[in-house]
Amino acid sequence: MILKRLDLSLLAKGLSVRLLLLTIAFVMLAEVLIYAPSIGRFRLTYLQDRLSDGHLAILALEATPDNMISETLTRELLKHVGAHSVAMSKPGAGKLMLMADPLGAVDASFDLREGSFFGLIGNAFGTLLSDGGRILRVVGYSPKDPRVVVEVVLDEGPMREAMIGYSKRILALSLVISFFTATLVYFSLHWLMVRPMQRIIESMARFRDDPEDASRVIRPSRRSDEIGIAQRELAMMQQGLRSALQQKAHLAALGTAVTKISHDLRNILATARLVSDRLADSEDPEVRRITPTLVTAIDRAVNLCQQTLDFTRQGAPTVELSRFDLNDLIADIGATLPDRVNGKAVLRTLIDGPFEIEADREQLYRVLDNLSQNAIQAGASQVTVSARYDDGRVVIEVGDNGPGLAPRAREHLFRPFAGSSRPGGTGLGLAIARELMRAHGGDLVLVRSTSEGTCFRLILPAERGRA
């Protein structure tokens, strides 16, 4: 079905047909450009032949003792020349003339001694466009002897007919050359370009119908030109897309299973959390000593289950916009962090005065809290938050003085289960944080990460930022 559709399209408006028509058109255009000087040259040669024949006719007159010949011979000579009259003059001699009948009015005169390139072309087209009824007077040097000037008076009609016949022969030859050249170009381009392009298109169409079928990936040729490069790039793209689709399918199935497991595991951990709370009231000192560690471990497990459920939830996060002061949100986050480390506040804000923004407060809280908690867990003793308006956007930066992200963490940043910078981490926090920011129409990016600290930038769109 695909092949039939492509063949019909090729016949109607395919690249091969267009190349064929363009080649014919260009060859014909070249022939027209060649024809113009050719027809001018043909007309000049025709007139020079008349001058040469006229010179020979005058020589017959010059051979007589009295420069006189019979009227019958005069008519025969003029008929051979194709003229009404012939005159000749040369240095040191008088002017000889052959004429059978009195001449009428001459319609146009042409001096071949003064002809230019464009003048010859213009005169030739003037003859072709005329009705051929004019009487012309032509003057020029004799091709037999450059010292001799010959003048002939002739009808334009025979010359015009000869020029039309020549034009027809040129047209026929041009058509043959055009079709021959176009055919060669057509088959060459069809073999070198069109057929490989059709193969690429067919592969794309077949791959689109079932991208997971390995047999539908194009097999690139060994060509080293642009077509070969395109085939190899397409094959790599199809293989990469096929692998990505397979991975997504596996992840979707895995996500469904993990969601069910995380849901049940969270309920189990909730029960364990209740039991661990009661252990804190135990009379056994050793039990009371290990209970906080147990509670912390259970809380981490519950948090992991919740993050996994949030990440695998179908659909994009729903954004519920509200207007609030960013300083109040930062204060709420600071309440969840240690008050001071080494006598310094853990969370510092560099925002002067109120800074109202429009966003989903709970989602932005999760993003900023995740960045702050990650910084503290990575070894930072201080987290700073700044905000500004930049080119119609709200830019919030969260920096710390920690040891910076490991190279592996920077390489896989924002990738779930691959971008964590600490042992036992999942990398879900940053992946979810970026997803929440993009749901706002903004983004979360890493600005820098060195041994002196790390800085993340949150971007919110203008229409949801400035008051």
Image (spheres, rainbow, N blue to C red):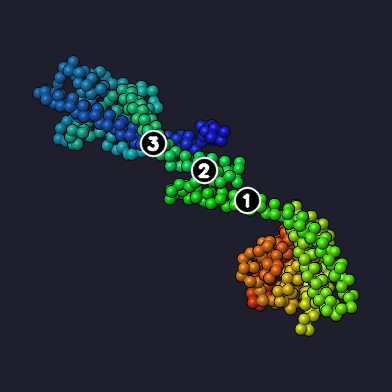
Residue at screen point 77% across, 55% down: 260
Q: Mark 3 points at which residue?
A: 184
Give the x, y percent position of residue 357.
Answer: 80, 63
The label on residue 200 is 2
* Label 1, label 3: how far apart the Cα atoms are: 46 Å
Q: Which callout, 2 or 3, points at the residue further toward the start of the chain?
A: 3
Q: Name the residue under label 1.
A: 246
Residue at screen point 53% across, 35% down: 3
Tell me the SS state at disc 1: helix
Q: Nearer the viewer, residue 183 or 47?
A: 183
Q: Which amino acid does label 2 sit on?
A: Ile
Query: Can you see residue 312?
Result: no
Q: Nearer the viewer, mark 2 or mark 1?
A: 1
Q: Which callout, 2 or 1, points at the residue further toward the start of the chain?
A: 2
Q: Which of 225 and 268 is in front in this view?
A: 268
Above or below: residue 420 compared with residue 45? below
Q: Which amino acid does label 1 sit on?
A: Gln
Q: Nearer the viewer, mark 1 or mark 3?
A: 1
Q: Do the residues labelled 2 and 3 touch (CB within 8 Å)?
A: no
Residue at screen point 59% across, 52% down: 243
The label on residue 323 is none
Indicate left or right for 426 with 330 as reference: left
Indicate left or right for 131 with 443 as reference: left
Above or below: residue 95 compared with residue 372? above
Query: Can you see residue 432?
Result: yes
Give the x, y percent position of residue 435.
Answer: 72, 59
Q: Which amino acid does label 3 sit on?
A: Leu
Looking at this view, name the residue that lies furthest to the front: 284
